[in-house]
Image: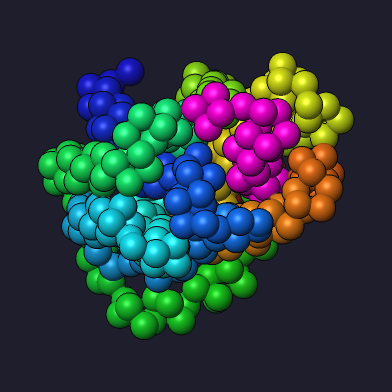
Amino acid sequence: MSDNERDWGRRVSVMAVIAATGVAVIYIPQPIQTLVAAEFGVGGSATAAAAIAIQAGYALGVVLLVSLGDRYSARRQVTAQLVATAVALAGAALAPSFWLFVALCFIAGGTATIGQILVSSALRLAPPAVRARTTAVLLGSFIVGLFIVRTALGAVADAIGWRGALVACALFVLALVPLSLRFSPRDAPSDPPAYGRILASIPRVAARSSTLRIMTGIHVLVFAAFIALWSMTTVHAVEALGLSVSQAALLGLAGLAGGVATIAAASVHAIVGPRRSLATCVGAALIGVTLVTIAPGSLPVLLLGLFLVSVGMNSEQVSTQATALASVDPSENGRANTVFMGATFFAGAIATAVAAQLVAVGGYTAVGILAVALVLAAASLAVVADRRGMLGARPPGRPAGGARD
């Protein structure tokens, strides 16, 4: 490994911490939703309102903010959004009413799109030899951050209250500002288009690349299955399994292990190529959702199923996102990532809302059936992609021939 690649590896490690924190923000309401609902006297499917709102805000932020990566430096944008996210979280901690809490969660979700900005910038700047590993490390950090929040925040909230836990989260986000100023990429496009033109061109970027559209579809479906299950895990664990909020939070260790596994397998994706990698990952997710569906009352089976869903979804994204972004001109990476991640989190918000209704009428098994159907649809779309030659033997992120299709 060259000195340049080693320096890049250290830089990516710091960016991974920042990116993981941004993604973790959108999962903050999940482990504390029962505590928040109890304080404000909210019941039924409304308890999931903050979890839905923060994902919808994130999706909107992807559309309105991530595409700005084609205009401004990641360093400038990430730093500003870290400050805004910390302020929104602090406001949510002080909210006097449930719906104001929900509104501030929506804002925090919108400004927490830090990880997507860093992924797009990193893929544009990474040396070709380490592009697949860069993708895997950043995406693996997403799920690690997500499940550190799910695992730790419930226990912290039990100890100091959900408001104190949110203040702690806000302070942690704010502490990342100096790291962003030092390590986030500071390159900016030399001749950036106007913001209005960037937004107006997003549909055209998607229309020009069938690879972008199909890779997005695959990930949207697997992610929707993943988020449908995990968004209702705390409710299922507390109400059906009889666990405390702290004990239910420990289920997040299964997801955390999935993130660690994604990072550990980073080099494998470049070796086996997107075709085998995607097939393996979607297969793991399918096994996982099936296990959860057939035995939701068995804690060991539930943990194994959630682990497989988590590692399958996150590792699948290594192939689909890198392949999607490689199918467009590098100057359009921000907009391509907007398409990919915007669709992902809009679908996540919808899946969370549907899962909240399903768990009320059919329990966790009903949510599992939805997840199985979604992953099967993703597998079918992956077959279509393979037959169209979108999953060749080239490493993820390295285009073969023309960049567009």
Residue 137 relative to residue 357: left or right: left
Q: Which residues are magenta?
A: 223-247
Residue 341 relative to residue 131: left or right: right
Give residue 255's position: percent from left, percent from top: 56, 28
Pick the front one: 261 or 348: 348
Residue 12 relative to residue 363: left or right: left
Give residue 328's position: percent from left, percent from top: 51, 60
Give residue 285's position: percent from left, percent from top: 72, 33
Residue drawn at (67%, 47%) of the image: 228
Give residue 36's position: percent from left, percent from top: 46, 50
Q: Is residue 128 visible?
A: no
267 drawn magenta: no
228 drawn magenta: yes
Quarter of the image with the N terminus is: top left
Residue drawn at (61%, 56%) of the image: 43
Quarter of the image with the C terminus is: bottom right
| Predominant SS of the magenta segment | helix
Pick the front one: 210 or 372: 372
Q: Is residue 299 visible?
A: yes
Pick the front one: 221 or 240: 240
Pick the front one: 223 or 211: 223
Residue drawn at (49%, 22%) of the image: 260
